[in-house]
């Protein structure tokens, strides 16, 4: 979809990412997803009277890693209180950063050679999670509401882009690249479906060359697909409105995935006055040069560079291979591809095996790069079929032993030459007609004999060895 | 007997913690109905704590520097399992699941917490008259207020119910009631005592401090509770200061500034007492200069924007969702409103509204922002003064203890009773009040000594010089 002639979208994204610290931002409670409600809580993250926050240094490390990866200036920063009432926010204020964020003025380069500016990437605490029963799942009209404070106080970084994007596809590319960067820094797992990365999109439209139009903010987009479709819908809505002589009202909108449309959540006149002021319970955060250097040194190569290194292994990359590279980089599994490539294995096959066989596995640590390479080398030599190679990889990932043991346990070792020749001789004897026609030049019958050999040996024969044996006898 | 002597007697096995506690409980029993000092007396908890101290002595162990000394706690300090109300209906019935750092340190030193004392609701007031549970009476004259907000803690020591008490001082809430009750009260340097477990009124101003009958007891108590706490990010990095070791250092060669603004509008007897105290310090070898710090006059206005602004945020959490009072409503917002309407008293509501207004878009720069600038000026003014002198002297309060109801209908008159104490909180510095002479109706006068951050050793030494002359010992 594109906009009607002469119209242009202007998009800026606000991305919240939870940090993968062991403990919460201001207390020692575990930062984990999916625990029993209200089990990872203490006086601090419940905001009990008299409790005080103490900043988690690991959260600062991770925020600085994100800032470094996004080419930001890491600066002296302060914490503020953002005041508003909401039942899942135990203190009825959120500790956030306001005029002095830890990271400012960065950028992210996208694969289409465009650059998106990063205005800021600041630290703040997450709220608890409300579940509203009855009333359509919204707080208003609910029969009762339950609050789980396990998420309360989980560290977040909010990354605010400039209004630099001009299409839904570009916004999706930005979000996707940002996600890859966040994963690469180790600060985030990038799991949008678990809410550890959440996106708000600011969308406006204008006639090309004119000043920015009035924007609407679409809240809480939880997949790249939603992001793309919500922006498309919203821009079309605004253009239709303007072309009919209407005006766009500045407001916050909600994306309904099922309906495929955005709708008004609240208009700007109702916007809250958050009464920001300096958080008196915390001191300034002033990372020195040594701290910056330590964070910078701990940061590995970023996705764009790692992707380029994989691409360089391929003469030309198909779209499927480019997708596979994205998956491999996201999961940080490129070491397998590099190892296989060094051993002379086809890079396309290696990419495909990693993207398909390893991607769905939580823990790949039981599969060494050596075992992966050995398996794929056997596949290349024809000692394992593709199906067999995949089965071997699955066993290796489960920790079932080394390659030869797994191949033996599966019965995938190939028959010796003598044993194979014996089998072929007996099959020729019991199928004299077919053998005659093959000898007379009917090549198609090679497949017939291969099939028989495979059935007889339960797949343990090497197809190529069967063909060369048959050729030799013809 | 002083707390020091009592603790020594317990450590030597000459007295038991349990006997000290029973004496304390008897004193409370005799006058608590009349004076309304304690909101809650934790008899079982105190008896168990005293027994532990005695057991340790019996085993030949040292229970600590406050062995067996009963102590009263202002009811804005969280103590595990003990009702903690801030004298507010909104927290009625709440029992904290954790203890303030200072309480852990007290118990670690062998002290026996006997109960929770009355205060102005959320420490907002100067007379304990804003307590939702009724005012505390001044033990020296029950027709008058004990001061506030830590009026219950001051009265406990003044009435001999406990030798020691803890209060909190946001704008004078320790020093002013100490003055009105004729005892010693200390507002330590900001960050010297951990605020963890102190229910916040105005976080950048709040500081816990000691009440005692004499200077040395106050020094001992402060030594026990002070020192870095990793649970409070604003806690100073160093351990507790040595106060008792320097208590008799005197003031010879020290420079003392008599501050005109800390006498403005005070009763003549109070001005005379401060001048007499200044003479005592001069006689002890100090150089005295008179000086003026005009910025101090701005303190009250800045304070009544900054403290309510922080309070409006600190008190937001009392929303009926998680603990304390809940008054039902049709939806969450209605429940929040009904709860807060029923749970907070008039003074608390006044300050929440004032603070919310001061922080609001369009007003922030003119009010809160301006107040922060005044605060910076105040800090600068003190810094300049402390280039000339080592410590400052003035009155703690403009008047002695006043009768009930005399200021409740005029918030400004009530606020003015903290006019001499507020500047120290804004600057984050140290000050103490000690009884020195008597004024109207033979009621005690408090003289205030002020010093820069971390000047407590000098402040206590100077206070001891005055006390020695006043008591003749």
Image (spheres, rainbow, N blue to C red):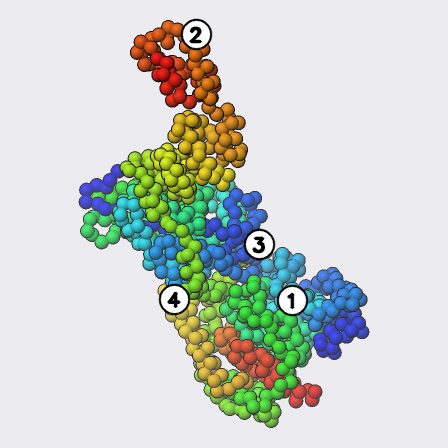
Quarter of the image where the N terminus of chain B is located:
bottom right
- In which chain is the residue bearing label 1? B
Q: Position of residue A121 (x, y in %)?
A: 38, 56
Q: Nearer the viewer, residue A368 or A255?
A: A368
* Label 2 vs label 4, nearer the camera: 2
Residues packed near mark 1 inside 10 Å, few (<14), some (14 to 19) or many (20 plus): some
Task: Name the element at disc 4.
Answer: loop
Looking at the rendered structure, the secondary structure element under dot 3 is: loop
Identify the disc placed on residue A42: 3
Chain holding disc 3: A
Closer to viewer: mark 4 or mark 1:
1
* Mark in front: 3 vs 4: 3
Q: Residue at x 61, y 64 (%)?
A: B101
Vertical side of B362 occupied by B331: above or below: above
Residue A310 at what x, y percent from top left?
34, 42
Q: Which mark is residue B105?
A: 1
Q: Which residue is mark 2?
A: A430
Q: Chain of mark 4?
A: B
Q: Residues within 10 Å of mark 2 (few under 14, many from 20)?
A: few
Q: Which residue is mark 4?
A: B363
Structural distance between the alpha carbons of marks 1 and 3:
21 Å
Residue at mark 3 to residue at mark 4: CA–CA distance:
36 Å
Give the mark toward the camera: 2 or 3: 2
Inter-mark Cα distance, 2 to 3: 79 Å
Asked if both marks, 1 and 3, belong to the same chain, the answer given is: no
Secondary element at tag 2: helix
Does residue B21 appear in the picture of this structure? no
- CB within 8 Å, label 2 to label 1: no
Badge 3 crowding class, 10 Å Cα cut-off, few under 14, some 14 to 19, many 20 or more, is: some
Q: Are marks 2 and 1 on the same chain?
A: no
Q: Is residue B104 above or below residue B323?
A: below
């Amino acid at each position: 979809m594109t906009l009607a002639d002469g119209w242009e979208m202007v998009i800026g994204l606000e991305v919240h990412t939870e940090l993968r610290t062991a403990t919460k931002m201001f207390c020692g409670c575990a930062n984990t997803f999916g625990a029993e409600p209200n089990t990872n809580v203490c006086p601090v993250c419940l905001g009990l009277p008299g409790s005080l926050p103490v900043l988690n240094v690991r959260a600062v490390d991770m925020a600085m890693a994100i800032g470094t990866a996004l080419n930001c200036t890491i600066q002296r920063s302060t914490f503020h209180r953002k005041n508003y009432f909401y039942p899942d926010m135990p203190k009825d204020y959120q500790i956030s950063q306001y005029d002095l964020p830890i990271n400012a003025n960065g950028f992210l380069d996208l694969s289409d050679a465009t650059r998106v500016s990063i205005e800021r990437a600041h630290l703040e605490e997450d709220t608890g999670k409300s579940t509203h029963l009855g009333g359509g799942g919204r707080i208003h009209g609910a029969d009762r509401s339950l609050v789980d404070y396990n998420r309360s106080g989980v560290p977040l970084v909010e990354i605010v882009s400039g209004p630099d994007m001009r299409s839904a596809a570009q916004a999706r590319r930005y979000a996707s690249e940002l996600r890859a960067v966040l994963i690469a820094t180790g600060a985030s797992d990038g799991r949008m479906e678990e809410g550890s990365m959440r996106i708000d999109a600011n969308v406006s439209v204008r006639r090309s060359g004119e000043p920015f139009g009035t924007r609407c903010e679409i809240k809480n987009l939880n997949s790249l697909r939603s992001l793309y479709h919500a922006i498309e819908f919203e821009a079309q809505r605004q253009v239709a409105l303007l072309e009919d002589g209407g005006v766009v009202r500045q407001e916050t909108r909600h994306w309904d995935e099922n309906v495929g449309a955005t709708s008004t959540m609240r208009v700007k006149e109702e916007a809250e006055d958050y009464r920001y002021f300096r958080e008196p319970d915390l001191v300034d955060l002033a990372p020195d040069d040594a701290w910056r250097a330590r964070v910078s040194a701990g940061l590995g190569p970023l996705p764009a560079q790692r992707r380029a290194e994989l691409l360089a292994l391929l003469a030309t990359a198909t779209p499927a291979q480019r997708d596979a590279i994205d998956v491999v980089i996201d999961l940080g599994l490129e070491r397998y591809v590099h190892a296989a490539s060094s051993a002379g294995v086809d890079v396309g096959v290696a990419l495909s095996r990693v993207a398909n066989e390893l991607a769905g596995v939580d823990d790949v640590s039981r599969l060494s790069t050596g075992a992966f390479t050995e398996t794929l080398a056997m596949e290349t030599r024809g000692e394992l079929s593709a199906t067999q190679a995949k089965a071997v990889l699955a066993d290796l990932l489960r920790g079932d032993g080394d390659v030869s043991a797994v191949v033996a346990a599966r019965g995938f070792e190939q028959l010796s030459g003598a044993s194979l020749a014996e089998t072929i001789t007996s099959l020729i004897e019991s199928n004299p007609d077919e053998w005659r026609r093959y000898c007379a030049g009917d090549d198609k019958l090679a497949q017939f004999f291969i099939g028989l050999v495979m059935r007889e040996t339960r797949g343990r024969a090497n197809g190529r060895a069967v063909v060369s044996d048959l050729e030799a006898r013809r | 007997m002083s707390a020091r002597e009592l603790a020594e007697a317990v450590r030597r096995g000459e007295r038991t913690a349990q006997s000290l506690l029973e004496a304390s409980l008897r004193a409370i029993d005799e006058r608590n109905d009349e004076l309304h000092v304690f909101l809650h007396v934790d008899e079982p908890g105190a008896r168990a704590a005293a027994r532990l101290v005695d057991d340790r002595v019996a085993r030949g162990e040292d229970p600590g520097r406050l062995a067996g000394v009963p102590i009263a706690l202002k009811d804005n300090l969280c103590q595990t399992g003990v009702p903690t109300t801030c004298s507010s209906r909104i927290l009625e019935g709440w029992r904290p699941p954790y203890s303030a750092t200072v309480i852990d340190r007290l118990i670690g030193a062998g002290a026996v917490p006997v109960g929770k004392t009355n205060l102005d609701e959320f420490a907002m007031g100067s007379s304990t008259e804003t307590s939702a549970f009724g005012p505390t009476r001044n033990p020296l004259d029950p027709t008058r207020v004990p001061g506030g907000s830590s009026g219950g803690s001051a009265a406990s020591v003044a009435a001999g119910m406990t030798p020691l008490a803890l209060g909190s001082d946001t704008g004078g809430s320790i020093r002013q009631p100490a003055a009105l009750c004729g005892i010693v009260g200390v507002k330590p340097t900001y960050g010297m005592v951990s605020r963890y477990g102190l229910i916040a009124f105005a976080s950048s101003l709040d500081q816990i401090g000691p009440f005692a009958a004499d200077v040395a007891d106050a020094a001992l108590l402060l030594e026990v509770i002070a020192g870095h706490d990793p649970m409070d990010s604003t806690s100073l990095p160093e351990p507790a200061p040595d106060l008792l070791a320097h208590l008799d250092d005197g003031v010879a060669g020290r420079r003392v500034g008599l501050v005109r603004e800390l006498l403005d509008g005070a009763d003549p007897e109070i001005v005379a007492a401060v001048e007499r105290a200044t003479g005592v310090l001069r006689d002890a070898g100090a150089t005295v200069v008179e000086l003026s710090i005009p910025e101090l006059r701005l303190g009250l206005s800045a304070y009544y924007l900054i403290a309510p602004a922080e309070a409006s945020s600190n008190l937001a959490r009392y929303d009926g969702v998680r603990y304390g009072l809940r008054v039902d409503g049709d939806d969450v917002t209605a429940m929040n409103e009904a709860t807060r309407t029923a749970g907070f008293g008039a003074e608390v509501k006044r300050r929440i509204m004032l603070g919310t207004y001061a922080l609001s878009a369009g007003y922030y720069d003119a009010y809160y922002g301006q107040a922060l600038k005044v605060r910076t000026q105040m800090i600068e003014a003190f810094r300049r003064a402390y280039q000339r002198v080592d410590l400052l002297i003035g009155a703690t309060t403009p008047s002695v203890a006043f009768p009930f109801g005399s200021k409740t209908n005029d918030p400004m008159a009530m606020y003015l009773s903290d006019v001499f104490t507020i500047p120290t909180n804004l600057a984050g510095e140290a000050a103490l009040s000690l009884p020195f002479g008597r004024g109207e109706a033979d009621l005690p006068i408090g003289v205030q000594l002020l010093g820069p951050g971390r000047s407590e050793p000098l402040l206590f030494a100077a206070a001891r010089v005055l006390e020695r002359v006043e008591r003749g010992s």
